[in-house]
Image: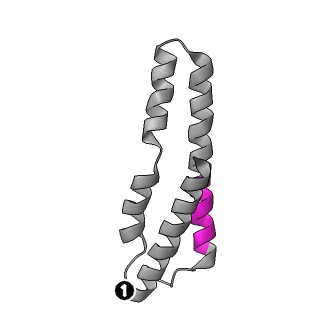
Amino acid sequence: MANGAFAGALAVGIVSGLLSRWRDRPALVTLTFGILMLVPGSVGFKSVANFITHDPVAAIQTTISMIGTAVAIVTGLLLARVMVPRRAWQA
């Protein structure tokens, strides 16, 4: 799951950076909607549900999976930022 999140975040970051340069708009306009699709909200919900149903081992496993996915998303975005640097915003 983390590999897909990394690839998705990398693709969203690169496309957002290129669109930012091409359209002369802030990258956050497109980046926000792309990242919202990648956030592992259901995995966090499963983790809490496992804690509530008194299954701590499964809850910890899903929490670690969620953290790994979040780290993969951040890593993909950082790498995309290095590959396609944003232009300097001028007011």
Q: Residue furthest top?
A: 54
- Residue 88 placed where, x, y %? 50, 84
Dominant secondary-structure state across the stretch colored magenta: helix
For label 1, count other residues whose C-alpha is less than 10 Å away and answer few (under 14), some (14-19) or many (20+). few
Is 91 drawn above or below residue 71 in the view shown? below
Label tally: 1
Q: Which amino acid does label 1 sit on?
A: Arg
Quarter holding residue 77: bottom right
Report the residue at 58% width, 32% height from top. 63
User: How is the model colour-coded?
Assistant: one colour
Q: Is residue 2 left or right of residue 24?
A: right
Report the residue at 47% width, 28% height from top. 46
Determine if the magenta segment contains residue 83: no
Q: In which quarter of the image is the C terminus?
A: bottom left
Q: Give the range drawn in magenta.
A: 71-81
- Residue 75 placed where, x, y %? 63, 59
Q: Is residue 78 left or right of residue 34?
A: right
Determine if the magenta segment contains residue 77: yes
Residue bearing the label numbered 1: 23
Mark 1, secondary structure of its residue: helix
Q: In this view, does 87 lie to the left or right of 25?
A: right
- Residue 53 placed where, x, y %? 47, 13
Report the residue at 42% width, 81% height from top. 19
- Residue 26 placed where, x, y %? 40, 76
Report the residue at 40% width, 54% height from top. 37
